[in-house]
Image (tube, rainbow, N blue to C red):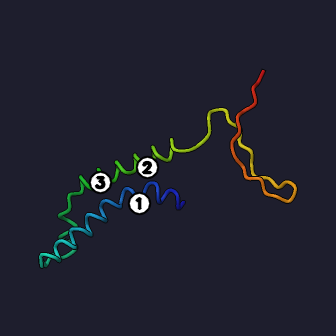
Amino acid sequence: MIRIFFIYIVPLLLPSLVHFGWLMWQRRQKGADTSPTELFLGMPWVWTLLVGFILVILLILIFGFGDGAAPGAQYLSPRFEDGKIIPGGFVDAPDQP
């Protein structure tokens, strides 16, 4: 569940939150007295959502193609041998006749 949160939700909402925070900081520096509600309604939502969707797509591609095994590889689970834990991993599949 936490993986879904970090892969899908955070990249989608992060540009909006950063933009909103930057606008609030910028308004305070100028001394403008704008309520957060007015600032929230005046945000460019199309651009922030577009950047969020691009980040989500990039993360899906990075995590989807970044690691894994070759097609046909066999997974060996972790095991306990001779008092030691042997980590799991992928091995090449044996050639079939």
Q: Is the residue 74 above or below the residue 54 in the image?
A: above
Q: Amino acid at mark 3?
A: Leu
Label of residue 52 in the image: none
Tell me the quadrant of the picture where the C terminus can be found: top right
**What residue is shown with label 2?**
59
SS for tag 1?
Answer: helix
Q: Are circles 1 and 2 on residues that touch, CB within 8 Å? A: no
Location of residue 17 in the rendering, given as x and y in whole percent from the top left corner: 31, 65
Between circles 3 and 2, the one closer to the viewer is 2
In the image, is 91 to the left or to the right of 8?
A: right
SS for tag 2?
Answer: helix
| Most foreground residue, 69 or 54 | 69
Q: Amino acid at mark 1?
A: Val
Sequence-first tag of 3 and 2: 3
Q: CA distance from mark 3 to mark 2?
A: 15 Å
Q: Is the residue 1 above or below the residue 55 in the image?
A: below
Location of residue 14 in the rendering, given as x and y in whole percent from the top left corner: 35, 61
| Most foreground residue, 90 or 20 | 90
